[in-house]
Amino acid sequence: MKTLRSLILASFLLLVVTSNAQNMQEGFNHLETGEYALAETFFDTVLKSYPKNKTARLCYGRAVGLNGDPEKANHIFLELLKEYPTDFEVKLNYGESLLWKNEFNDAKSYYEALVFEAPKSFPALLGLANTLSNLKDYNNALIYVNKALEVSPGNPNALISKKYIYLGFAYQKQLAQLYDEAEILLIKNLELFGEDKETLMNLANLYLINNQLDFAKGTYKRLAENPLHTIEALNGLALVAHLNGKEKHALQLSHDAYTSIDTKTSEILIQQTTERYIQALIWNKKYKQAEHSIDELIANSPNANWVLALRATLNIYKSNFKKSLSDYNRILENDSTSFDGNLGKANALKALGYYDDAYISAENTLKFYDNQKDALNFINILNTSFIPVSDSKAAYTFDNGNNRAFTFNTNVSFPLSTKFKLLGRYNYRTTNNSVTNNEANSNDISLGLSYQLINNITFNGTTGLTTANTESNNYTQLLTDVSFNIKPLKLQTLDIGYKRDIQSFNADLLDREIAQNNYYANYNLNTNFNLGWFTQFMHTSQNDGNKRNLLFTSLYYNLFSKPSLKMGLNYQYITFADQVPTVYFSPESFQAGEVFLNLIKDENITKSKQWFYELTAATGFQFIEDGERQSTYRVQGKIGYKFSELCMANVFGTRSNIASATAAGFTFTEIGLRFKWHLFDAPVFRK
C-alpha cells in the first residue's frame, strides 16, 4: 500500500492547477508530506465555505482515507462519481479507495475497466499492477507495472512498485519451497535496484530457511558494505554464527551491533538489535545477564510481546516450561495471530508432554502463516516421534574366555495416539564355547504397551516368553518388564520398574536356567550449568536363591554442545549374598571407578543425509573383594548415516576388560550393525 499512497503526486498534478488550487496549497502540502490529519482538518474547513468544490472534496476524501477511515473516503468518492460519472480523476480516486478497504477483487475489476478506457493512463496501469500484487497475482502484476513504466519510463513510484512485486513474488515462491526460483527473482531485483537493503535482507533470509548458511553469511557481508546498514548486517551474521554452532562468535557480533546503537538508530532497529543481543546471551547460557536485561525491559514495557517472547525463550532454555507457557499465553492474549506466541506455545507444550495441544498450537501458526517452514518442521518432528518404528540390531561378541555369540533383536513401537502405543520385541541369541564345546540358543518374544497416564508420567509394560535350547536342557520362561517413567521436576527423570529375564551371557549360564527378578530405579539430574548426575540402583533376586545389589552412579560435565563433548566419573558397586565363583561371577563386593570422555553427534538432531557418531573412552580401576586393584579400560563407538528423517543405519563396537556380574578377568569385544526404519511416512492416527 505504500506505493499506492505514493500515487498522490501523480494523481493530483492536475488538481493543483484547477481553480482555487492556489488557495488550497497548504492542504496539498499536508497531503504530499503525509500529514493526513492536518490535511483532513484543512479541507474540512474549506468545504464549509465551498461545499461543492470538487478539488476540495477529492482532497478531503483522500485525507480521510489515508488517515484511517477508508469507508468514509469510499463514500465520498462514490458521491463524487455520481455527480461526475465521466471524470477520470474521480474514477482513479474511487479505485484507490477500494484498495484502502482491502476490496482487492472489486478493485481488480474496476481498474481493468479503467485500463480498458484509458490504456495509456499511468495511474490506472500502476493501480492495476498494485491491485494484482495484493491479490498475489505477481506474473500479471509485473506485466502491468512494466506497461506503466513504458508510459512513464523511470517513474520512481512504478519502480518502487516493481521492487515490491518482485519481493512478494519471491516470498510466494519461498513459501512454496521453490527456493531456486525465489533466489532468481531476488537476484533480478538486485540487478534492477542495486544493493537494495530489503532485497538483500530477503535473500539472506531465503538462504537461512534453505540452510545455505555460507550464502546467508556472504549476503549479510554485502549488506555490511553500506555503513548505514551495519547493525542489520551484524544482527544477521550473529544468527548465522548461532546456526553454525559458533555461539561465542554470535555473542561477539551481537554485542558489536548492540554497542553501535546511537540516537540516530530507529526504534524498530533498536528493538531488533536488543532482541538479538539477549538471544545471544541465552545461546551462550549467560542466563543471569539475559534475565537482568529482560527484567529491565519488562519494567518499561510489561506487556510488549517481543519482551515476553524473550523471557519465554529464556525459560525454555532453563527448562522452566510452565513459566514459558504462561508468557506465550500472554502474548496470544495480546495478539492471537502472533507467530512467536503460537509456535513458542507449541514448543512449550511439547516439552511439558501435552502433545495434542502442541499439534493444535502449531497448526494455529499455519492458519496465520501459510506454509511457514518452522511450523511445518515442528509438526514433522512431532509426527516422526509418533510414526511406527522398527529398530533392529545384529551383533557378534567374543571374549578371552573362548565364548562366542551372535545376537539379533528387533524392537517395534506402534503409536495409536499421542498417549498410547503398542510395543513388541524379538531377540535371538546363539552362543558357544570353543573349549567346552557347549552350545546354546534362545528366542525371546515380548508384547506390551506404553501409556501416558498424565503429562509427566508414562507407564511401559511388556511380557513374553523366552525359549532356550542347550546341550542338556530345553525350557521356557516368562519375561516381564514393567516401569514408570516420571518427570518429577524440571531437568529430572526417574524410572522405577521391575524386570524379569534370563542369564544368557554364555552357553553355560543359559544351560543353568537362572531367572533374575530385577527391581530398579534410575534417576537422572541435569542442570543449567552443564553438570549432570545419573544414578541406578538395582536389587536382583534369582531362582537359585542368590541375591544381588548393584549401584551405579555417574557425575559428568558438558564441555561443549555441538557436537556434545562431556567428561565425567563413573562408580559401580556390586555385592552378592552368596559366592558361587565356579558357576558365575558373584563376589561379596566388587567396586569399579573410571574417568571417561564422551563425544557425540546425536542422531536425533542430525539432519537428513548427514553422518552421526559417538565415541566413548574410559579408564580406571576395579577391586574384587580384597584383591589387588586391576586397571580397566573401555572403548565404545558408533558411526552412522541418516538417509532421511525416517531411516538411518550405523555400525557400532565395544571393547572392555571391566568385569560384569557374570565374569571377571576377561576382555570382551562386540561389533554390530543397527538399522532403524520408520514404517510409514506419518502417524497412523493422523492420516
Image (tube, grey):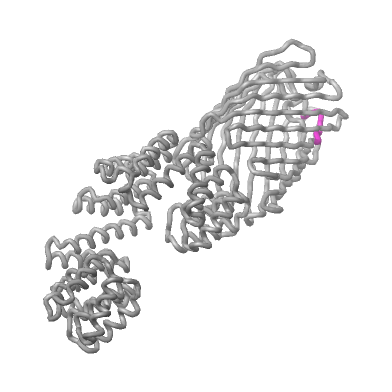
Extreme residue in the top direction: 628
Residue 153: quarter of image: bottom left
Position of 356 with respect to 268 (left or right) is right
Position of 534 with respect to 346 (left or right) is right
Quarter of the image containing the N terminus? bottom left
Give the extent of the magenta segment: 510-517
Query: Can you give x and y, in whole percent of width and height, for residue 41 in the image?
Result: 29, 75
Query: Can you give x and y, in whole percent of width and height, for residue 378 in the image?
Result: 50, 52
For residue 257, above or below residue 436: below
Extreme residue in the bottom direction: 83
Quarter of the image containing the C terminus? bottom right
Q: Is residue 288 magenta?
A: no
308 or 579: nearer the eye?
A: 308
Query: Can you give x and y, in whole percent of width and height, for residue 369 in the image?
Result: 43, 60
For residue 367, above or below residue 301: below
137 or 277: nearer the eye?
A: 277
